[in-house]
Image (cartoon, grey):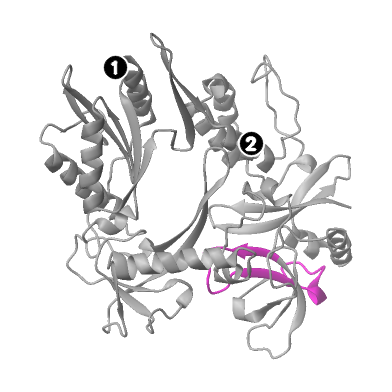
């Protein structure tokens, strides 16, 4: 008997797999891929359709959908069920099982978008989807061009996609459309990544489209040399917040728009790309890179060097920290104190002079399009509230939105709270083989909890570290 349906994300392969929750023979329940469920017995197909008929909409579209497919070299369209979909595979993105092959081991096949016809041409959404994706109701993150075009918010996503096209070709002039590619030149594939940006409270702030070059096609020594780029340390941010409270510094935030497109390529050989989803853009199929773009192996390094050169040239008093290369500072107590904390395209300025910050942002935005976010209220998914009580200053850091999304994603929103994060003398033991949960995102859960513990909840750190010692098979 089917108890529930879910969509499981395989991050390694960037694949969405349908899973079903079944009754266990010895009592209890377990999860199994829908492909294995349908291949086990022919009558399982009827059970799946019966369960899906009870739902008014399919909130895991296109998984579990009834479709008709045309096999390679065939002329007939056959009834099938979608079991999985691969986000990055633009050739064979869907895994299906033909209805006439139900109950046959190894009958799952991969098919392309042109060989699949859906009975429903839109992505069905209900309030329950928020529990699965962590997104607000009515907001989707397309996993490909077909979902983008047919989704309920397709107009907004197509506008976002067009905006990214104009940024790359017209505004930044990072890619030059070309009709042909010289013989023997390598063409790297581009893919489009669609991301719904949320604030710390979990509310939608922007639908973001990013065209990314598949950098795995680059050859070392030809298309790139060094790729290392430093990244900020969370401990540095904690120290800066503490210093701002002690010294009475003001904190401001700014964001660089499409920062990686501001760097110049560090190689002499031409780099050619094909447009996402093999589309024809501006009447051509290919483009030649004029600047650094997202996805290139050396893109983070190029942007860091470009940003560092500007900062050191802007004010000769700025110095690079010996401890954290992403921290720039001016230390002149009594005159001027400035800390510039750089996290890729997010700049946080702690300063004793508002005039210095205003002039810095004016010069910075004149060189690169930037967004002034005003006083610091959010950074790296953390909500920050600064308070001044005269002799006492404090900063409250919270991640309420992340916690709520985690509870809903892992179906723990109705659990009972407790005073301690871990019961005394807890000993985790391997579960019985029949009760073992297949392919549940245990590692994903531990990683999210670890980030939460590092940022704002040190009280659960001991419990999370203990969970990290146990792998997902136990």
320 displayed left or right of 64: left
Q: Is mark 2 on a helix, strand or loop?
A: helix
272 vs 226: above or below: below
Q: What element carries label 1?
A: helix
Among the 4 quarters of the image, the one containing residue 223: bottom left
Residue 382 seen in the current view: yes
Neighbourhood count class around disc 2 (C-alpha, 10 Å): few under 14, some 14–19, many 20 upward: some
388 vs 60: above or below: above
User: Can residue 437 be found in the magenta stretch?
Assistant: no
Q: Name the residue under label 1.
A: 247
Q: Mark 2 points at which residue?
A: 404
Q: Residue farthest to the bottom?
A: 75
The residue located at (79%, 45%) in the rendering is: 30
242 displayed left or right of 158: left
The residue located at (73%, 57%) in the rendering is: 59
Q: Residue 457 carries which label?
A: none
Q: What stretch is highlighted in magenta?
A: 83-108
Q: How many marks?
A: 2
Q: Do the residues labelled 1 and 2 touch (CB within 8 Å)?
A: no
Neighbourhood count class around disc 1 (C-alpha, 10 Å): few under 14, some 14–19, many 20 upward: some
Q: Residue farthest to the left?
A: 316
Which mark lies nearer to you, 1 or 2? 1
Q: Nearer the viewer, residue 131 or 158?
A: 158
Q: Position of residue 85 (x, y in %)?
A: 62, 64
Among the 4 quarters of the image, the one containing residue 45: bottom right
Q: Position of residue 13 (x, y in %)?
A: 54, 57
**Where, quadrant-wise, is the C terminus in this rendering?**
top right
The residue located at (21%, 39%) in the rendering is: 359
Among the 4 quarters of the image, the one containing residue 244: top left
């Amino acid at each position: 008997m089917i108890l529930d349906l879910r969509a499981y994300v395989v991050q390694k392969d960037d694949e969405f797999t349908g899973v079903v929750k079944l009754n266990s023979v010895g009592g209890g329940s377990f999860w199994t891929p829908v492909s294995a469920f349908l291949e086990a017995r022919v009558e399982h197909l009827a059970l799946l359709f019966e369960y899906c008929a009870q739902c008014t909409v399919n909130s895991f579209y296109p998984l579990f959908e009834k479709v008709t497919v045309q096999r390679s070299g065939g002329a007939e369209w056959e009834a099938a069920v979608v079991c999985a979909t691969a986000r990055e595979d633009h050739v064979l993105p869907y895994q299906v099982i033909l209805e006439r092959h139900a109950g046959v081991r190894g009958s799952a096949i991969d098919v392309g978008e042109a060989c699949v016809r859906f009975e429903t041409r839109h992505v069905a959404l209900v309030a329950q989807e928020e529990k699965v994706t962590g997104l607000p109701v009515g907001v989707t993150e397309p996993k490909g061009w077909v979902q983008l075009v047919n989704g309920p918010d397709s107009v907004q996503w197509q506008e976002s996609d067009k905006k990214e096209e104009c940024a790359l070709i017209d505004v930044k002039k990072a890619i030059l459309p070309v009709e042909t590619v010289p013989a023997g030149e390598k063409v790297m594939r581009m893919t489009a990544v669609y991301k719904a940006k949320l604030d710390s409270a979990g509310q939608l702030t922007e639908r973001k489209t990013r065209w990314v070059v598949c950098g795995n096609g680059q050859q070392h020594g030809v298309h790139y040399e060094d790729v290392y780029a430093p990244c900020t340390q969370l401990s540095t941010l904690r120290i800066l917040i503490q210093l701002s409270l002690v010294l009475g510094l003001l904190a401001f935030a700014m964001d660089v728009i499409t920062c990686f497109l501001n760097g110049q390529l560090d190689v002499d050989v031409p780099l050619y790309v094909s447009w996402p989803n093999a589309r024809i853009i501006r009447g051509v199929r290919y483009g030649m890179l004029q600047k650094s773009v997202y996805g290139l192996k050396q893109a983070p390094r190029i942007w860091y060097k470009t940003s560092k050169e500007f900062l050191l040239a802007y004010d000769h008093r700025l110095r690079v920290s010996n401890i954290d290369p992403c921290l720039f500072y001016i230390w002149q107590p009594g005159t001027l104190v400035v800390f510039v904390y750089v996290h890729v395209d997010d700049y946080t300025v702690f300063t004793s002079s508002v005039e210095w910050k205003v002039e810095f942002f004016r010069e910075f935005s004149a060189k690169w399009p930037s967004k002034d976010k005003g006083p610091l209220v959010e950074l790296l998914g953390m909500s920050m509230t600064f308070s001044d009580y005269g002799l006492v200053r404090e900063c409250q850091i919270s991640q309420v939105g992340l916690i709520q999304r985690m509870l809903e994603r892992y179906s723990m929103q109705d659990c009972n709270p407790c005073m301690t994060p871990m019961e005394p003398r807890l000993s985790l033991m391997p579960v019985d083989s029949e009760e073992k949960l297949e392919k549940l995102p245990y590692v994903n859960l531990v990683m999210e909890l670890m980030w939460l513990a590092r940022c704002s909840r040190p009280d659960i750190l001991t419990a999370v570290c203990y969970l990290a010692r146990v792998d997902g098979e136990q």
